[in-house]
Amino acid sequence: HLKGWAANGFSWDTLDWMACFKYFAVGIALLITVAVVRLPTAEFSISKELSEKWSGILIEAALGALLIAFLEEYVFRSLIWKAFSMWRPMIGGVVIASVFFAYTHYKMPAELWDAYNGSIQFSAGLYVAWGTLIGFFYDASLLDFLNLTLLGVWLSLLRIRSNNLARSLGLHAGIVFALLAFVEMVDVQTTPLRWLFGGPGLRDGLLTFLIFSGGVFIEVKSFRHSASSVQ
């Protein structure tokens, strides 16, 4: 079951490719929406070198987004999803896989890395693995974790409804592309009302919660519409 492009969600026809580009645009639109709402209340500056480096920034952001989205969708919406796809009700598997997706987005805390004085050897790898494992307990907030879980649910529902990774990979890549490009192009010094608008990334804030909840709601409605049509 783990062998072959089709078995892992990469067998796409023309409509799937079109859907991938469509959801890539949706991911970018989400970041633009948040930025338009947030920036009027924040202190920020545009990169002084943007006029000279904008093409390089976009190319690097695109390559990074495609790599990150490909790897994470393959791992979470293909390999790991297969471990939970037989759960009944299916939503149980979706939620567990999405919680794991959210958990793994917390990295090794900076203070643990700064405190490490050892040389680069095998024990250093174990130290990093341990720091990554407990990173959630250092940096997580309830809303932050909930937002990442909701994104995982949304991506999982896209994968289930289409039976491939075209839509989830497109949305994921679009979000990451916009984030990487935004970070390089715009320097946000302060973010007032962060609890409402969120920070530099699309993971905290009530606005992010509403956006991801809306995506999940739309997918659930699509499932119900499809079920009623079949009946």
Image (tube, rainbow, N blue to C red):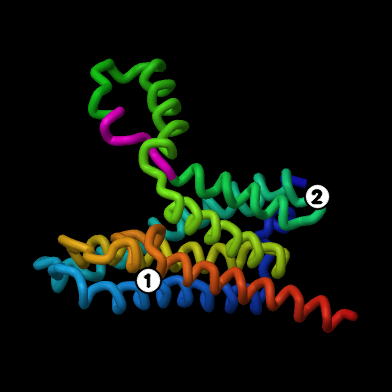
Residue at image x 47%, y 63%? 173
Horizontally, residue 193 falls left or right of residue 107, namely left
At label 2, the amino acid type is Met
**Front one among 176 and 106:** 106
Residue 215 picture quarter: bottom right
Disc 1 crowd, CA 10 A, few/some/many (<14, 14-19, 20+): many
The Cα atoms of the two marked residues, 1 and 2, are separated by 34 Å
- SS assignment at label 2: loop
- Does residue 215 sit above or below 77 in this rendering? below
- Taking the magenta stretch, the answer to whether it contains residue 52 is no
Name the residue carrying label 1: 31
Residue at image x 13%, y 68%? 45
Q: Can you give x and y, in whole percent of width and height, for residue 147 in the image?
A: 48, 58
Residue 113 picture quarter: top left
Residue at image x 54%, y 68%? 213
Q: Can you give x and y, in whole percent of width and height, for residue 58 in the image?
A: 30, 67
Q: Can you give x and y, in whole percent of width and height, for residue 52 in the image?
A: 14, 69
Residue at image x 42%, y 43%? 106
- Does residue 221 sit above or below 5 in this rendering? below
Span shown in magenta: 106-112
Name the residue carrying label 2: 86
